[in-house]
Image (cartoon, helix red, strand yellow):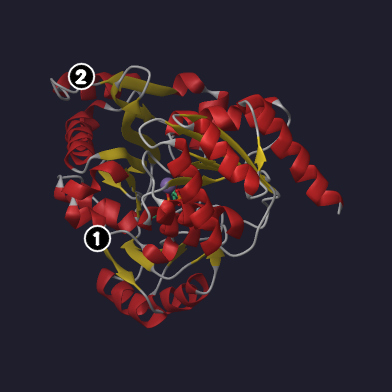
Amino acid sequence: MKLHEYRSKQLFSQHGIPIPRGRVAMTAREAKLIAQELGGRVVIKAQVLVGGRGKAGGIRLVDSPEEAEEVATHVLGMQVKGLPVRRILVDEAATIKSEIYLSVTNDRNKQCPVIIASAEGGVDIEEVARTKPEKIVRVHVDPLLGMRQYQARQLAASIELSRECWQEFGNIVWGLYQTFVDTDATLAEINPLVISENNRLLAIDGKMIIDDNALFRRPELAEMRDLEEEKPAEREARRFGLSFVKLDGNIGCMVNGAGLAMATMDVIKLFGGEPANFLDIGGGAGADKVAAAFNLILKDEGVRAVLINIFGGITRCDEVARGILAALKEVEGTLPMVVRLVGTNEDQGRHMLRNANMVVATSLGDAAQKAIQLSTEGQST
Ligand code: GDP
Ligand code: MN
């Protein structure tokens, strides 16, 4: 779950990280009042859950409350990368000498958190990562020992931070690491952490992603989910406990098990097709869950054929087949469907599905090829 900038910065602030004074507004009039309170020179920031708002015109510096109102009207009416701006953050404008990048995330290969820093932070950090990877430095943290103060000094030295900022930088790295741990985040990022004219540090942008699997024990964070910003399909999937990621291809996939879902997508690609989604319905899914999964797939207008790949272990294949048939009665619309069903009572299960006019495949490779074939046939008619 992504958090808005203003939420992220509030969490940072609670962990001792300096952030600009500011508040959220939903109307231009409010923005003007906040700008008055803050002394006029403010930055108006679109609160949408995508990066690169600055380049898209969603971050605007203004010099007076009147200008704040005018610009706020404009920003509140705009879309940033297709997302309508419903809220803006009005922050006291910072004077910037330079911009640092600082984040904490998990290094999956090393199986531990990693703190990443760069002296060349700001809106072009992706470009820096591509063209000057040596400008991005990392220290790994032993999750059992926790972060050590020397690690912040290591980072400070590596990014050649001026000595007088080390103390403050150390506190910020510490605060960011604690924020990361305390919220079960998978990312806590400050970009940029700015150095002001008088060499003070200030986190002017914040981004956090909270691990969805930890939200059950972080109810105060779960409440921060911005439903308006989520795609309807993602919302539906969460409601039914499905892991769903929409992709750009035309073969809808319905699979039980994340690993099997990945393998299914790989095999589709191997034979030259493109999956329309990743979808894991999980083990022991009942007919209602299967129906919800079908609905998600069928609502995607790009889908031309569906590949159902089920391994019936604990749940027997005839049960699965019954579930699929029951679910199909509930969903609207239809598409060519290919099924690969393997496991306990597979013969019975296949028989039931064949009788219902589904294409039953013998292997995953066979299923992928049949689905690809059906998806192209659909296009020419
Ligand atoms: P992003 O584009 O979504 O990452 O939004 P940011 O909040 O990071 O803003 C983008 C850029 O706008 C920053 O890297 C800064 O260069 C600039 N910016 C943002 N806030 C301020 C501010 O208060 N003062 C100044 N001078 N520049 C700012
Ligand atoms: Mn930024």
Where's residue 86, x and y in %? 43, 71
What label does residue 142 carry, if any? 2
Mark 1 and mark 2: Cα distance apart in space? 30 Å
Crowding near the residue tagged with mark 2, few <14, some 14–19, many ≥20 C-alpha atoms within 10 Å: some
Q: Position of residue 317 (x, y in %)?
A: 47, 37
Quick one: 117 or 281, which is closer to the camera? 281
Residue positioned 66% across, 43% down in the render: 249
Amino acid at dot 1? Glu
Q: Is residue 18 visible?
A: no
Residue 105 visible (yes or no): yes
Q: Horizontally, is 337 left or right of 190 in the view?
A: right
Which numbered dot is residue 6? none
Please tell me which residue is depicted at 63% across the width and 50% down the height of the picture. Answer: 356
- Note whether ligand 2 is within 8 Å of mark 2: no
Q: Position of residue 33 (x, y in %)?
A: 30, 79
Whether residue 236 is situated above or below residue 344 in the rendered picture: below
Residues at discs 1 and 2 in contact (Cβ within 8 Å): no
Q: Judge whether 167 appears above or below 220 on screen.
A: above
- Describe residue 54's horizontal placement relative to residue 27 as left or right: right
Mark 1 Cα within 10 Å, few/some/many (few <14, many 20+)? few
* Secondary structure of residue under mark 2: loop
Count of numbered badges drawn on the protein: 2
Q: Which residue is mark 1?
A: 223
Q: Amino acid at mark 2?
A: Asp
Q: Quarter holding the C terminus?
A: bottom right
Nearer mark to the viewer, of 1 and 2? 1
Residue 309 or residue 169, whichever sits in front: 309
Badge 1 or badge 2: first in the primary sequence: 2
Residue 181: x, y in percent? 19, 36
Which of the two residues, 254 or 62, is positioned nearer the viewer here?
254
Quarter of the image holding residue 164?
A: top left
